[in-house]
Each structure stands twice: as C-alpha cells, then as structure tokens.
Image (tube, rainbow, N blue to C red):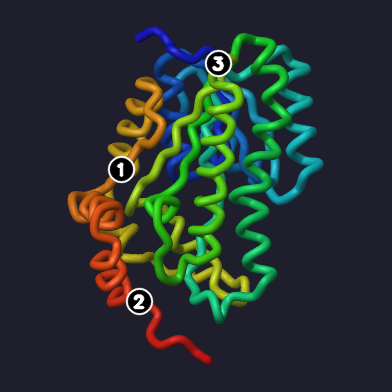
Amino acid sequence: MRARFKCIWITGASSGIGAEAARQLAKAGSHIILSARNEGKLQEVRNSLTNPEDVTIAALDLADSPTIHRAVEKVLDSGRIPDLVFHAGGISQRSYALETTMEVDRKIMEVNYFGTIELTKALLPAMLKNGGGSFAVVSSLVGLFGYGVRSAYSASKHALHGFFESLDIELGDDGINSSLICPGGVQTNISLNALQGDGSKTGVMDEMQSGGMPVEKAVTKMIDGIKRKKRVIIIGSGKEKFGVFMYKHFPSIFFKIARKQNPRGSVKL
C-alpha cells in the first residue's frame, strides 16, 4: 500500500493511541516522527515499527515550550516537513471542579491545548511553504459536551475544537485541513494517568477504558476518517454515539441522564 502521507509527526507516541497510530501508519511506508517526554519509551516504539530506520525521534514536553521548539528545529533542519501531524499527546482528569486546584486546571490546559497549538503554529509556516498538510487532533466525546469529573479535560478539548475549526476557515484554501477525532472509551491507560483534584494520578482503570474499544480498532477508524478528510470523527459504542445524538437533539434529557452518572460520590463542600 502506497503511503498517502510522506511524513507524519505523532505526539503522545510513547503509548496508547499515539503508539498504535505509529504502528499502523508506518506500514504504509511513511516517514514517522515520534514525540513524547520519555525518549526510552519512544525508542521501544521505534524498534517495534516497520522500517525503524525510517523513523525520527523528537522528544518534547507539551508543557515545556523550549522543548517543543527544539524538536521542531531538529526535524526541520533534517529536511523533514510533515504533511500530517497526529496530535495524540495529552492528559486527562477525574475530579469534581470544586475539588480541583487551579494548578491542575492550568496544567491540563497547558498540555492539552497550549502545547498542542504551539507545536502547530511552529510547524505551520514550513507546511504552508510545502503545499499544506493535515492536522489530526485527538479530542474526545467530552470535547463535544461537558461531563462529570472532567471539567478541565473537557474544557481543554473544547478549546482545541475552537482553534482547529478556526484554522480550517483561515487556511483551508491554502491546503491546511484538520480532523477532530472524538473517541469514547478506548482501551488505553489514560484513566490510570488521569489527574485528581490535587494533581496526583488516580492509578485507577475506569470501566470506560477497560471495557472500551480495543485501541487497534479505534485507531484504524481514526486513520480511515483522516484519509477521507472528515472534519469530525466520532468513535465509540452505540451507547456513546446515542449520547451525542441526545445532546444535539434532546439536551434537557441528556443532562438529566448525565447528572445520574456520579462516579466519585458526593461533592465535598
């Protein structure tokens, strides 16, 4: 199968959706750029890919601006210009808004939103000169609507929708397009690493993740939507897709149902 994209930059590539996207996209013959904080884990992913010699590691921390720009400089100086950027890096949250410190709110926004758009803006001039390219942004179903114990996470995903939809309007005629990927439960470690209100990790695997869609299947659906240039790619079970339908068409009923989903017990006042 001939590669549709010649060069693909993947964030959050050390595990989960990012690592699986690297495995699937590498099979088509694309040059893959892997980014995450842990360079050792990136090396492990690289070694698992088809043609690991055609893979670049560009470690970065989405919460650390200088590392983002060093990674961009390293890649562009090598002559590589991505025509697809797969934004899979991010952190989640499992805590009520009232019990979540502002430090946690800011950290989640820094990683999920500011770090993602900083990398995007740093790459855009080179991509435009190269004829354009695509951004695939892993959002969430809670990027479409708010949900309990995910206030900061949901807000960060909503912000990504606003930015990339605006970017499409501004630069669509110049060859830039975006796909916002909205998965429900996927079998990854995102809930294990999710932050509690005090900033500590939950260390708990949610039923949504453990019983979710296998990551291989979810990523295959994501890539199919990206290739078809779908603006919004909704991935989930029938129940999750029904939730999207109810939110759009019967919001009052949706919120009544959502309020009954109270996985953390009573709010502590």
Query: Which badge, 1 or 2, is on the more N-terminal residue?
Result: 1
Real-space CA distance between mark 1 and mark 2, rounded to the nearest whole angstrom: 22 Å
> Label 1: which residue?
235
Q: 108 or 166, which lies in front?
A: 166
Q: Nearer the viewer, mark 3 or mark 1?
A: 3
The CA span between labels 3 and 1 is: 28 Å
Residue 211: x, y in percent?
26, 58
**How many angstroms separate mark 3 from mark 2 (CA)?**
45 Å
Secondary structure beneath label 1: strand
The residue depicted at 58 percent of the width and 40 percent of the height is 163
Seen as rendered, the residue at the extreme bottom is: 269
In the rendered view, tell whether residue 90 sits above or below residue 98. Answer: above
**What residue is rendered at 34% in x and 78% in y?**
262
Q: Position of residue 117 (x, y in %)?
A: 65, 39
- Mark 1 surroundings: few (<14), some (14-19) or many (≥20) residues within 10 A: many
User: What amino acid is found at the position of numbered circle 2 in the picture?
Assistant: Pro
Where is residue 82 drawn, in percent x and y? Answer: 60, 19
Which residue is under mark 3?
Answer: 173
User: Taking 196 as reference, is 67 left or right?
Assistant: right
Q: Tell whether label 1 touches label 3 (CB within 8 Å).
A: no
Q: Pick the residue in front: 166 or 19.
A: 166
Reading the image, the residue beneath label 2 is: 263
Q: Earlier in the sequence, mark 3 or mark 1?
A: 3
Tell me if residue 54 can be seen: no
**Type of residue at label 3?**
Asp
Please say if 52 is above or below 213. Answer: above
Residue at the spot x=46%, y=86% of the render? Answer: 267
* Dot placed on the residue nearer the N-terminal end, 3 or 2: 3
